[in-house]
Image: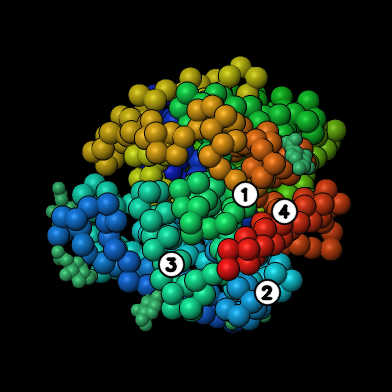
Amino acid sequence: MAIGFPFIFILFSLFLVPSFTFPFAPIIPRFPSSAVSAELKQQSHSAPDTLYRTNFFTQILDHFNFNPQSNQTFQQRYLINDTFWGGVKNNAPIFVYTGNEGNIEWFTQNTGFMFENAPSFHALLVFIEHRFYGKSIPFGGNREVAYANASTLGYLSSTQALADYATLIIDLKKNLSATDSPVVVFGGSYGGMLAAWFRMKYPHVSIGALASSAPILHFMDLVSPYIFNSIISQDFRSESENCYKVLKGSWKLIDDIANKPGGLELLQKSFRICKSDDFGAGSLKGWLRTAWVYTAMTDYPTPSNFLNPLPAYPIKKMCEAIDRSETEKRDRLERLHEAASVFYNYTGTATCFDLDDDSDPHDLGGWQWQACTEMIMPVGGSNKHSIFPEYEWSYQDRASSCQFFYNVTPRPHWITTEFGGHAIETVLKRSASNIIFFNGLRDPWSGGGVLKNISKTVVAMVEMRGAHHVDLRYSTKEDPKWLKDVRKQEVKIIASWISQYHQDLHSNN
Ligand SMILES: *[C@@H]1O[C@H](CO)[C@@H](O)[C@H](O)[C@H]1NC(C)=O
Ligand SMILES: *[C@@H]1O[C@H](CO)[C@@H](O)[C@H](O)[C@H]1NC(C)=O
Ligand SMILES: *[C@@H]1O[C@H](CO)[C@@H](O)[C@H](O)[C@H]1NC(C)=O
Ligand SMILES: *[C@@H]1O[C@H](CO)[C@@H](O)[C@H](O)[C@H]1NC(C)=O
Ligand SMILES: *[C@@H]1O[C@H](CO)[C@@H](O)[C@H](O)[C@H]1NC(C)=O
Ligand SMILES: *[C@@H]1O[C@H](CO)[C@@H](O)[C@H](O)[C@H]1NC(C)=O
């Protein structure tokens, strides 16, 4: 069996095309979501409907336009679990997950935190799918039409998505006669950005937000385009200097070999790449880069299953593969193959690696459009300390790629105009409350996260050893103490929001 080469490759390869004279084209790493506990995965695979019911809601295509053509509707999917709900009489809370760029069912598997805390909070659980993803496709559910061109994709934006969430939540509460039940929103990664923004923009719909690994500051003029790759480099370097050096040297090594007669065949054989007419140094380097980037994001303390199954602390395992082979005097290509295998072949079932597989099992492809319009999150730059080749990030490269693919010009400052970001401490201190920003510093996205406490109720939780929204994952017996402590503190803070809300409700009645 050839192992599934993940969807992310779509994003990498698409952006290689218009500018492949560069050592690395500007890439747009997407947000992965984390893992499924082994048990849950089994459970949800064997009986996919046991964790929630699936509903559809008739949603307005364009919330911000009264032009009759914009008055079309589409079916938006949401998942609901009322097993633990304390009900209307008690004004028991509603926990809403603000869906990310992908199939919402996948995110339920990554958000054990909500399931595990629903019983003690007597919470209703609701997971709302983001428009244009999964089964929430406008234009009659016709994906081909929805993704046809900029005039249909134009309805895919964060602002529309937030308005969808508000509309749906208000209608759901009306249907349940639960007008006074407090809503807490949750999200990780882009979903976490949406959760935070939702609390800022719709304080009348939600009493608080847990925004995990939400890089709301990862925008132009707010963040260095080099920090993303610097954090990844540091992750590897903190394991061993040799590991760092081997990875850093690998790009030139690959180019040198590729340029020799028979070099490509040697590379293809050393890395066990499946037969492919398109194989080249570029695709191999993209493939390795994918492994290092995504492993850094999901460097979790326990075994996980993000795209492919991973061991606990996978970066350590990669560096062990590189360093151990060093003492065994193994070939450098063989060491790199072994390190990449931690990401691509941990289960040992791959017979060869298929670089041509651009399947997208979690339906994440729409991020490409978002990254070409509003989500100009500069991440591709590499300085001379990076494990990746030096590369100067340029907005112009992104803009040209987006012109090429979608015939659109990004609006790089729209997000900060719409949601803010500049002087965030001064602003949110007065204008916002009840937001938790969690960040794990192993996660390259943490460079654009909120890392400082802003007020008593706009709180930053920063964990040195944490990775991409590790707090939201299902708990396991092996979880380290720091992770248990993070979750405990989050629960305590959320409980305080709800109790404050109930007090306010009583004193007003
Ligand atoms: C809600 O989730 C729990 C697991 O946390 C599950 O046991 C229960 O069956 C689910 N309820 C519904 C209605 O799907
Ligand atoms: C817009 O849609 C709603 C229901 O979907 C309908 O009642 C209304 O007449 C429509 N308005 C226009 C101007 O088409
Ligand atoms: C965009 O795609 C839609 C749906 O396929 C089509 O009706 C429309 O003519 C296209 N618009 C442009 C400008 O190509
Ligand atoms: C609320 O009930 C109406 C009428 O049954 C239904 O059409 C609508 O989809 C429901 N809203 C939600 C959010 O499920
Ligand atoms: C995957 O791992 C197994 C077990 O270690 C090994 O036999 C196989 O050759 C590996 N596949 C690739 C493509 O490296
Ligand atoms: C923010 O404040 C909380 C206590 O309210 C504390 O636990 C946490 O460590 C602080 N975060 C930072 C980044 O200082």
**Mark 1 vs 3, N-terminal side:** 3
CA distance separating discs 4 and 3 = 24 Å
Q: Residues within 10 Å of mark 4 (few under 14, many from 20)?
A: some
The answer to whether residue 109 is visible is: no
Q: Quadrant of residue 133?
A: bottom left
Query: Are the two marked residues, 2 and 4, in contact with CB atoms closer than 8 angstroms?
Result: no
Ranked by sequence position, the earlier of labels 2 and 1 is 2
Looking at the image, residue 69 sits to the left or right of residue 185; the answer is left
Position of the C terminus by quadrant: bottom right
Q: Secondary structure at mark 4?
A: helix
Question: Which residue carries the number 1 mark?
Answer: 434
First of labels 4, 3 by sequence position: 3
Could you tell me the amino acid type at mark 1?
Asn
Q: Nearer the viewer, residue 343 or 50?
A: 50
Which of the 4 quarters of the picture holds residue 466? top right
Q: Please give left or right for residue 72 compared with residue 488 in the image.
A: left
Q: Nearer the viewer, residue 485 or 16?
A: 485
Q: Which badge, 2 or 4, comes first in the chain's sequence?
A: 2
Q: Is residue 323 above or below residue 467?
A: above
Tell me the distance, in whole angstroms, between the alpha carbons under discs 1 and 3.
Answer: 20 Å
Horizontal arrangement in the rendering, residue 37 relative to residue 272 (left or right): right
Please state the horizontal and vertical placement of residue 142, each as a whole percent of the image: 27, 66
SS for callout 1: loop
Is there CB contact under 8 Å for labels 1 and 3?
no
Badge 3 element: helix
Residue found 29% across the figure and 56% down from its top:
63
Q: How is the image coloured?
A: rainbow
In the rendered structure, which amino acid carries the disc numbered 3? Answer: Ile
Tag of residue 170: 3
Query: Is residue 143 depicted above or below 457 in this figure?
Result: below
User: Marks 3/2: CA distance?
Assistant: 20 Å
Q: Return the residue at label 4.
A: 493
